[in-house]
Amino acid sequence: MVNSGNRPVVLVTNKETPEKGINKLKQKCDVIFPKSHPATRDEILELAGQVDGILWVGHMALNGEVLDRGGERLKAISTMSAGMDYVDIDEFRKRKFPLGYTPIVLNDAVADSAIGLMIAAGRRYHEGRLAIDQSQWKGGPQWLLGQDIKGSTVGIIGMGGIGQTIAKRLQGFDIGQLLYSGRRPKPEAEALGAKMVPQDELLQESDYVFIAVPLTNETYHMINETSLSKMKRTAVLVNVARGDIVDQKALVAALKNGTIFAAGLDVMTPEPLPADDELLSLPNAVVIPHLGSATVQTRNNMAEIAALNVLAGIANTPMFSPYPY
């Protein structure tokens, strides 16, 4: 039997979920996990109908199939993420099903990664390491020269929470101009000295371009062969959002033929990226495996917020961080 009494039961879909969130759930619920690690979809679907809530960890599709298998007993689900591109939001909206997520708390960690990628790509860290590995350390006044940050024009596509936090980090770098593009002006961005411009102008003028928008039908392959061709040949592209916002084949071509200078990527397509993917062979691509929110404190906080969301949903009270559908 899954239930050990009158306490609600919550399924946590990944055994490695931080204890801070698990312990929060255990105060009021019994907690179960799939037997396998990583869990299979069949296991999760089988258990969905035996629980009152689910803490959904990972980017496996969260859709009507899960809700159908949950049936009348399942009362609430919270993801442990800010990005929701793997969730069928329309299905949740249609059913008015309580859905939580964990934005904001990861803004600092993701912004830190973005700045790290900016520096690493602009200053050719990966290419320099390859030179060491291949005994090609040449030195000299013109060897492996990178791009300056001081005095540069920086563009941020998407001035939400993460974009604004990146902008705050940039204040310490004495950049020349900060541009942003989006659906509407953001007073918070203006307060940071950012100027809203059309995306084409941002691409044309920026020395560094950050992608910080969610993946939607509108943003899918927003950065493609055409948009890359508008960028400076000395420009650096940084993506900490979702891989499919960038047409990766077009990006590989642009990096190979010098359309842009370099790229720093925390996200890509697919994930995990195969070891033989051409992207990994490029000296001017700094690629890390989706580590944006991967700090101890950030993941602890995400797990705790997700747990609070599930507990509130089960109790039929407002979630700590409900998804605004």
Image (cartoon, grey):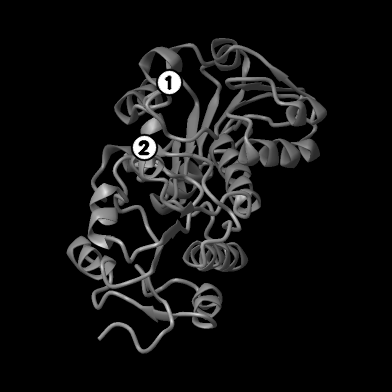
**Of 222 and 87, which appears nearest the observer?**
87
Residue at the spot 54% in from the left edge and 51% down from the top edge: 322
Q: Residue at x 64, y 33 (%)?
A: 141
Q: Residue at x 56, y 66 (%)?
A: 308
Q: Answer with mark 2 or mark 1, whichever residue precedes in sequence.
A: 2
Residue 81 vs residue 112: left or right?
left
**Quarter of the view holding residue 300:** bottom right
Badge 1 element: loop
Q: Given the current orientation, which residue lies at the most extreme left position?
A: 42
Q: Is 88 left, or right, of 261 in this rendering?
A: left
Residue 295 in picture, x, y percent from top left: 57, 63
Quickly name the residue at label 2.
90
Q: Amino acid at mark 1?
A: Gly
Q: Is residue 197 above or below residue 9?
A: above
Q: Please give the residue where the numbered disc 1 appears in the rendered image.
A: 258
Please rate how many residues cluster around mark 1, counting C-alpha atoms within 10 Å: few if below 14, some from 14 to 19, many from 20.
some
Q: Is residue 71 left or right of residue 111?
A: left
Q: As drawn, which residue projects farthest toward the bottom?
A: 4
Q: CA distance from mark 2 to mark 1?
A: 41 Å
Q: Is residue 260 above or below residue 322?
A: above
Assign the N terminus to one quadrant of the image.
Answer: bottom left
Please provide percent x and percent y for residue 124: 53, 39
Viewer-nearest residue: 75 or 10:
75
**Total marks placed:** 2
Element class at badge 2 = helix
